[in-house]
Image (tube, grey):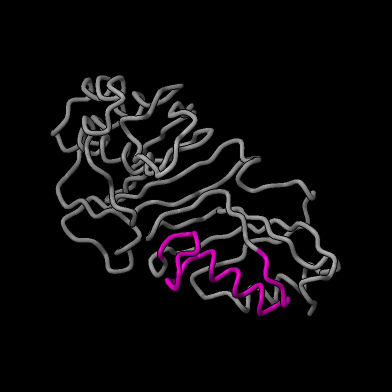
Amino acid sequence: MTSDDAPTSNYRLDLAYDGRAYFGWQRHGDQPTVQGAIEDALTACFEVHSAVMGSGRTDRGVHANGQVANVLLPADLDVESAKSALRGALPADIQLLDLTPVADDFHARDDAKAKTYRYVIWNAPECPEAEVGRVWHVPRALDVQAMRPACRVFEGNHDFASFAKKPNFVRASTVRRVHSIELTQDGERIEIALRAEGFLWKMVRNLVRAIVKVGEGRTPCEKLAQILKSKDRSAAPGTAPASGLFLDSVEY
């Protein structure tokens, strides 16, 4: 236990969470958020009020298997004891995977070199109860073989203005490099893993919706390149639900 004016050091948090109960990552008034739950747990354990800086602000209902954050905590922490205490203080749907001291200038968002998001689709007439809220349930059969070349369209360096929601601030650029988009299928479960240097707001969910449109037979694959070049959000399909999206990993 310590007070806010005690010496502090920078610590990295590796986290996983189920986003169904939260209004996204970022604190949002009195609504339950992932950031808020973590900060409350830190205060309960260490009597500090420190802002937790995440690698990205996942939206309402989005999950994580590999979110990274950094926070200032007491410099003299016994790390193993701190891990145990924090795990006990966090809600059951937020897991602390690791807690490690890092350099004072480490920043979970600004230092990130690449991120991988994974999107999960359950493609069958019925969705198992355990998967509800953690997948996008698409009842009608998708043409997975048609979706594979659709993934290739978005790989590389492109202006993704057509596939991003406009934020309430001026963006420096809508150009991003997508390193890879890999589609796998295991029975009813279809997963799309997207790895890039960074993503625009709702870009992953918008790309997934476009790829699924091809699988539904509603958009020809050739049209995706035209939509991409148009740099016009209104030319693109809608947005896939948040329920199937996971932040899988962050690279530094």
The quadrant where residue 54 appears: bottom right
The N terminus lies in quadrant:
bottom right
The quadrant where residue 156 appears: top left
Towards the viewer: 246 or 226: 226
Residue at 51 percent across and 75 percent down: it is 92
Relative to 172, residue 82 above or below: below
Q: Position of residue 53 (x, y in %)?
A: 61, 55
**Left or right for 175, reference 87:** left
Relative to 32, residue 51 above or below: above
Residue 29 falls within the magenta-colored stretch? yes
Residue at 34 percent across and 53 percent down: it is 244
Give the magenta-colored segment's residue range: 23-50
Q: Position of residue 70 (x, y in %)?
A: 67, 55
The C terminus lies in quadrant:
top right
Residue 33 falls within the magenta-colored stretch? yes
Towards the viewer: 129 or 28: 28
Residue at 50 percent across and 41 percent down: it is 116
Towards the viewer: 71 or 132: 71
Q: Position of residue 233 (x, y in %)?
A: 27, 33
Towards the viewer: 220 or 127: 220
The number of callouts visible is 0
Q: Position of residue 223 (x, y in %)?
A: 21, 22
Q: Residue furthest front?
A: 169
Residue at 50 percent across and 65 percent down: it is 34
**Left or right for 28, reference 213:** right
